[in-house]
Amino acid sequence: MKPYFAKMTEFGHALKKGRIKSTEENLNNIKNIEEDVADKVNRVKLAGFPEEKINARGQMTVWQRLEYLVDPGTWCPLHTLYNPMNNEEGTTNVIDGVGKISGKWAVIIGFDNKVMAGAWLPGQSENILRVTDLSKRLNIPLVWLVNCSGAKLTEQEKFYANRRGAGTPFFRHAELEQMGIPVLAGIYGTNPAGGGYQSISPTILFAHKDCNIAVGGVGIVSGMAPKGEFNLKAAEDIIERAKQFRTKPPGSVSTHYDETGFFRYVFEDETGVLDGLKAYMKDMPAYHPKFFRVTEPKEPRFPIDDLYRLIPLNPKRVYDFDEVLARLVDSSEHMEFRPDYGPEVYAGLCKINGFLVACIGNRQEYLGRDYPEYADYPGMGGKLYRQGLIKMNEFVTLCGRDRIPVIWLQDSSGLDVGDAAEKAELLGLAQGLVYSIQQTDVPMLLLLLRKGTASAHYLMGGPTANRHNAFTLGTAASEIYVMHGETAAVATYSRRLVKEKDAGRPLEPIIEKMNKLAQDYHEKSRPLFCAKSGMVDEIVPLRDLRKYFVAFTGAAYQNPKSICPQHHMILPRIIKG
Amino acid sequence: MTHEIVAPLDGKVFQLKIKPGDTVEEDEEILVIEAMKMETPILVPCDGIVREIRVKEGDEVAENDVLVIIDEELIEA
């Protein structure tokens, strides 16, 4: 299929000096936000004991283990700021992301052994379920660095039980294994109770010589058989038994290597465990990239740092979407799907690192007096109209047919509204897009370039499409809300304003509430809030976006569950005509 | 050569960033039109000097109204 993919249509333009002059403030504002995000990320890295203290115990930190394990330059962290239950530790206490190990993509996750020796914390199981979902969606191995002291007992009611509680990941591990997706685990330290299941549930266990895994640890074994109260004699008994078990904790290597054989391998050194994982990943079944590549990888023709000038931080500011995309895809080349139809939506085939991907995004400019064709008002980009919805329905359906992963670049203020829009069937077409996405069964990535608003956030590959959305990335410019805060304030208080006015009462108290609501919306839609609450899986600096695209695409093509031969693809033929 | 910069859409002049006699560079943002809740920046098509500004901030403009006139050749001289 060389005629289709070797040289596609070039798009984009180099920035002119006037543009550079006009966008200095925007660049600085975005970088300021990125620095703030980086500062918060650094705080997560520094949580708990300092690295020196862990190293003095003869242990590596989870960060050091990751650095040793992952191929240089491939680590794409996810969920770093995820902390939905507002833990005082500032983390869910697992560190995860996508990266290569021995040349193969994997989803990688480890307990932060600096924080309460890797304890379960509130929100952690949700984090782990996102990670197991990711492994399932991309059909790539899950690699664990287990070092889990069990539950933070003083907050167990927040995470121990429930449908998506701390035990659910064990069922997800079983599910992955039943789907043929291996779960490898390097095991360190003391892993009692929940930590024991974290250790035993993976497929192959690589143990450090000093680790132990057990149904119950020292604390549980020495404190069983409740007597109704604690007194001095009980305390002395506890001390005696704790000393006994501390000398020889249950489930050590002598038990689970020599006796049960649960541990497949035992290593003297911490790095030996990681070398063991690397050796297994090297042998992991995976397609060679050449199997699916349509061309040799090439960088975009324009510098990625241009994005700091092309994406306005101001959510109202119009910009040229095509110029943004041209900074992210190979050679700044594409094959656009139906360019003369549904102008508010970009849909096209592009290449990332030599692999074919489908890209869908929101164009932002004014659409002219004659569009949308069903209304007597002009259209504005960022909104979705009838043609755009039909175009996306067609495009994702064909992507599913041709087995092409999809990257959504979302920046939408929502669907057109009003009776003309209803008559134009927007509601049915929108849910039709949900149906189309659901039936594709191809991995999707959402980049929330700027606004994720109203139902458009759901429809355009949002995390709500969670069977197919592998992960969602945010930027310094991202904001997510059901509607703009000021719109919400009007919707909430307009009738109250009328009532107060008719009653002759002062309006100021209501106005104050409206301003408060608008401000609250603003604060709860910004990048840090989105990352903390999990609306996005990571806030990524603009200059790293392509790196995540490369990781997503490479992972999606490593072990796809089904294949469309390139010469059987229909979408490129439809575009060519 | 003279360039007439026209409004691409109906709206209100939200920001005016130039004055007559200013030197401007290709793709520089010289004004912003607010319409349909969005802000559309107006860029100059060439290096030049602002000869005339026919609008002020707050003015309502219609599509194709001339907003600004730029002299391209003056910068070459």
Image (cartoon, coloured by chain):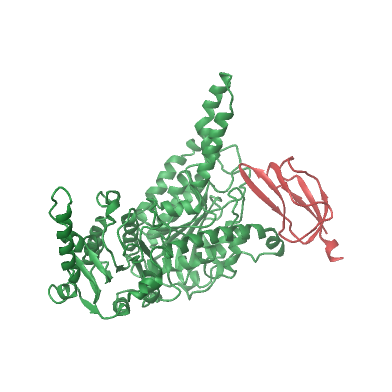
Chain colours: A green, B red
Quadrant in the rendering for residue A234: bottom left
Report if residue A71 is visible in the image.
yes
Across and down, in percent, residue A66 comes to 38, 72
For this view, does A489 lie left or right of residue A172?
Answer: right
For this view, does A449 lie left or right of residue B45?
Answer: left
Foreground pick, A211 / A287: A211
For this view, does A258 lie left or right of residue B10?
Answer: left
Foreground pick, A358 / A566: A358
Foreground pick, A530 / A172: A530
Write the residue at 59% across / 24% down: A506
Residue A418 to residue A362: above or below = above
Foreground pick, A414 / A333: A414
Report if residue A575 is visible in the image.
no
Figure label count:
0
Residue A42 to residue A379: above or below = below
Q: Which residue lies most toward the front here?
A: A232
Across and down, in percent, residue A486 comes to 55, 39
Quadrant of image for the N terminus of chain A = bottom left
Across and down, in percent, residue A409 comes to 50, 56
Across and down, in percent, residue A3 comes to 50, 72
Q: Which residue lies most toward the right here?
A: B77
Write the residue at 53% across / 38% down: A516
Quadrant in the rendering for residue A26: bottom right
